[in-house]
Image (tube, rainbow, N blue to C red):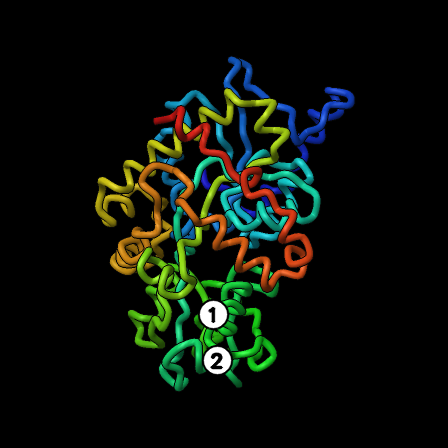
Amino acid sequence: MRLNRLTVAAVAFLPVAALALAGCRDSRSAATTSADGTPQVKIMVGGINKVIYLPAMLTQRLGYFKDAGVDVQLSDEPSGASAENTLVSGQVQGVVGFYDHTITLQAQGKCIKSVVQLAKVPGEAEVVSNKAPLAGAKDFKGKKLGVTSPGSSTDYLTQYLATKNGVSTKDYTTVKAGAGSTFVAALTNGGIDAGMTTDPTIATITSKNLGKVMIDMRTEEGTKAALGGLYPAASLYMDCSYVDANKDAVQKVVNAFVKTMKWISTHSAAEIADKMPADYAGADKALYVKSIKDSSPMFTTDGVMPKGGPETVLDVLGTFSDTVKSQKDKIDLSKTYTTDFVTDAK
């Protein structure tokens, strides 16, 4: 069942009640089970209808969580930072969001790790308005550039692209453009000259001839050209204490996701779209299929962290994130992800 942000309050109440019953037990590590003993896991998705996070709902729709013997409750929070905070506070047990949050949180003294990697690249693109004279990141100077929000992954990647191409981050204006309709409106009315976003927003812009893709990080080739290496993004990350205390439940969740990643790699965009909730496609099913087709190269086929990927992410965050910059040399990447569960799933 698809849940919206209004369910967050209800979801948040359950761990609190469980904590009260368990005395001093920390909700970040405590497991809950149904009456028949099935593990229950709450997962918040940083934009449940975004193509980059499609595997979460697809796994639910395919019935793979149930097949794996785990009761997963999905909820939606479009802001990755808010989803991250919900995890840290113990209101959910997992987040489907960008891997880079695990590094940022370690720099803040918290241990969060990716247990299954869904995407090997950001799945994002720098889209430029047809009215703006930009040919590449070297033309960012003096422009208004849209990001999801300041301090977001899109913000750090934009800063990296600018600096790599000789443009100071002080020489352009960062605009909070969000995603979906707000991003499209900003690009259309001149609020931004260009910006970083994901599908299906990219597909909407290009199909309506409102703009074009200037830097494409939905593929391995495009990401390597833009960033110099792979940049693992969408993942399922969890609190380390929860992972250590609930390995059976985590393994079941990972088993389901790994099965989904294999399914994605062997089915067409149209077949994938058919499995998703009808409202995700809106009034234009063909456009939704196109957005999945264009973005599907970003997904891993096995849930494994791509070699060298964490180092690229640390390089970006260690350069532009004030939180990570001062701690860069102390970051232990081996604690930000594990391949143990994926290996056992295979």
Seen from this angle, which residue lies furthest top? 36
Examine the image and state in which quarter residue 291 appears.
Answer: bottom left
Residue type pointed to by label 1: Leu
As drawn, the label of residue 161 is 1
Indicate whether 21 appears above or below 115.
above
Residue type pointed to by label 2: Phe
As drawn, the label of residue 26 is none
Give the distance between the C-alpha atoms of the residues marked 2 and 1, in whole angstroms: 9 Å
Front residue of 323/53: it is: 323
Q: Where is residue 258 in the image (x, y as percent from the top left)?
A: 36, 33
- At horizontal 55% and vertical 65% (from top left) the residue drawn is 155
Q: Name the residue under label 2.
A: 140
SS at circle 1: helix
Q: Where is residue 227 in the image (x, y as percent from the top left)?
A: 43, 62
- At horizontal 50% and vertical 20% (from top left) the residue drawn is 248
- At horizontal 22% and vertical 46% (from top left) the residue drawn is 268
